[in-house]
Image (cartoon, rainbow, N blue to C red):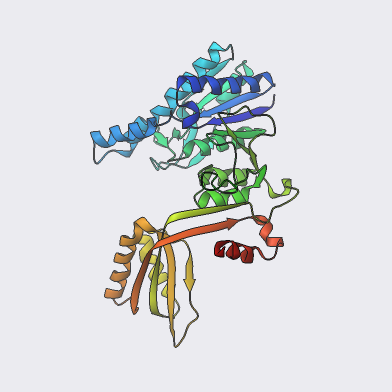
């Protein structure tokens, strides 16, 4: 029997009515001959509410108890989805992460998946179950305690299940009807993509596109799991949404797949730094220790043994970065003439594997910015 994984995000299961709509989609796939594994998020807003309860209860909370509380949102949704499917005469049952079991490391609140055991769910499929509804975002650690995978963990759960069970495809249902060339709320010229390569989707996700979580795309690319991004609120046919797949599956490659942008950027420049071996490590090591996420780095051509070093970073981390740079100057480890900061910066990123075979893309981009 072919297997399909279907993942429903928080907005897709935000109410009992929306859970019923999602269940009808699952029922249609069962009628089409599939066994289905459904991965569900918590109902929209529930995770934030649970986190708030934890923080109100304890300022210095135990991460293991945090996971026990926060994971409950997905378990509620899974039970409600299974009950709804049973009312539709679809044989279904719910599974918490520990019941599968989905095994993780012991990094509570940011755990990584190590193994998904397939025996229990496959045994139930063999007994006539048609739908396994699994609570996303959670697993069980080496100590037998519940763990959570961090924000966006339900996407990662869905892809991991698709890989472990050899699913034909993993459908991600969300509040958008696919992947667009840029944010359609910003410009009416944004175009929905029929297909996008894993590499392009990973780049867009890492640059801030919120359609898919970065870890889930990495996992899909590594395991060759075909993803389809669909809207929960539209009637979808077999060609709906955007397929995220191997580059080889895309016959005609566009030069540019998408444009991502961020306004939450800053730029920091160290003027007249000694150009010597190890200088970059002396600068960026302390930044890493301070928890500063450095993005782009530009170093000027050296003149008289001195150079300028510029890097971009999230605007919210400027104070930490400045403190780290002032500390290395005070210690004498790095000597520079001046430290400059610009917080009025936007980052625009053009993404596309087709740029490798198309000349002139950069020129067109800068001409568009000029105009």
- Image location (x, y in percent) of residue 1: 69, 24
Q: Is residue 153 above or below residue 218?
A: above
Q: Is residue 80 above or below residue 260?
A: above
- What residue is drawn where x is 48% and y is 64%? 296
Q: Is residue 357 visible?
A: yes
In the rendered structure, the answer to whether residue 342 lies left or right of residue 93 reads left
Q: Is residue 253 above or below residue 112?
A: below
Residue lying farthest right?
251
- Image location (x, y in percent) of residue 282: 39, 71
- Image location (x, y in percent) of residue 8: 53, 30
Q: Quadrant of residue 345?
A: bottom left
- Image location (x, y in percent) of residue 235: 62, 27
- What residue is drawn where x is 56% and y is 29%? 232
- Residue 86 versus residue 20: which sits nearer the camera? 20
In the rendered structure, the answer to whether residue 325 lies left or right of residue 362 reads left
Residue lying farthest bottom?
304
- Residue 266 versus residue 334: which sits nearer the camera? 266
Look at the image and tell me in which quarter the C terminus lies.
bottom right
Residue lying farthest front?
371
- What residue is drawn where x is 61% and y is 16%? 127
- Please tell me how many numbered marks the rendered image carries: 0
- What residue is drawn where x is 40% and y is 41%? 106
Q: Is residue 335 visible?
A: no
In the rendered structure, the answer to whether residue 83 lies left or right of residue 368 reads left
């Amino acid at each position: 029997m072919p297997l399909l994984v279907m993942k429903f995000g928080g907005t897709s299961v935000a109410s009992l009515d929306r859970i019923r709509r999602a269940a009808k989609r699952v029922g249609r796939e069962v009628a089409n001959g599939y066994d289905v594994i459904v991965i569900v998020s918590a109902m929209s807003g529930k995770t934030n509410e649970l986190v708030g309860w934890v923080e109100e209860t304890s300022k210095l909370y135990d991460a293991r108890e945090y996971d026990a509380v926060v994971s409950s949102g997905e378990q509620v949704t899974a039970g409600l989805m299974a009950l709804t499917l049973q009312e539709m005469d679809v044989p279904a049952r719910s599974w918490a992460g520990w019941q599968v079991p989905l095994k993780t490391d012991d990094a509570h609140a940011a755990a990584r998946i190590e193994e998904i055991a397939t025996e229990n769910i496959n045994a139930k499929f063999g007994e006539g179950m048609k739908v396994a509804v699994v609570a996303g975002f959670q697993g069980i650690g080496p100590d037998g305690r519940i763990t959570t995978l961090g924000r966006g963990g339900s996407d990662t759960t869905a892809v991991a299940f698709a890989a472990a069970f050899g699913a034909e495809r993993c459908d991600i249902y969300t509040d958008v009807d696919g992947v667009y060339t840029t944010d359609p709320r910003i410009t009416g010229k944004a175009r929905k993509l029929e297909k996008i390569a894993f590499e392009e989707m990973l780049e867009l996700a890492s640059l801030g596109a919120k359609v898919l979580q970065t870890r889930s795309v990495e996992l899909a690319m590594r395991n060759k799991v075909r993803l389809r991004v669909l809207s929960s609120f539209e009637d979808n046919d077999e060609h709906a949404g955007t397929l995220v797949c191997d580059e080889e599956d895309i016959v005609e490659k566009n030069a540019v797949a998408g444009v991502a942008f961020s306004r939450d950027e800053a730029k920091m420049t160290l003027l007249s730094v000694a150009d010597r071996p190890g200088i970059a490590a002396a600068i960026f090591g302390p930044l890493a220790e301070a928890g500063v996420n450095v993005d782009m780095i530009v170093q000027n051509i050296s003149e008289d043994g001195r150079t300028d070093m510029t890097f971009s970073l999230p605007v919210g981390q400027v104070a930490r970065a400045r403190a780290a740079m002032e500390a290395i100057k005070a210690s004498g480890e790095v000597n520079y003439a001046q430290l400059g900061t610009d917080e009025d910066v936007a980052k625009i990123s053009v993404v596309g594997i087709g740029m490798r075979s198309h000349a002139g893309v950069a020129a067109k981009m800068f001409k568009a910015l000029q105009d």
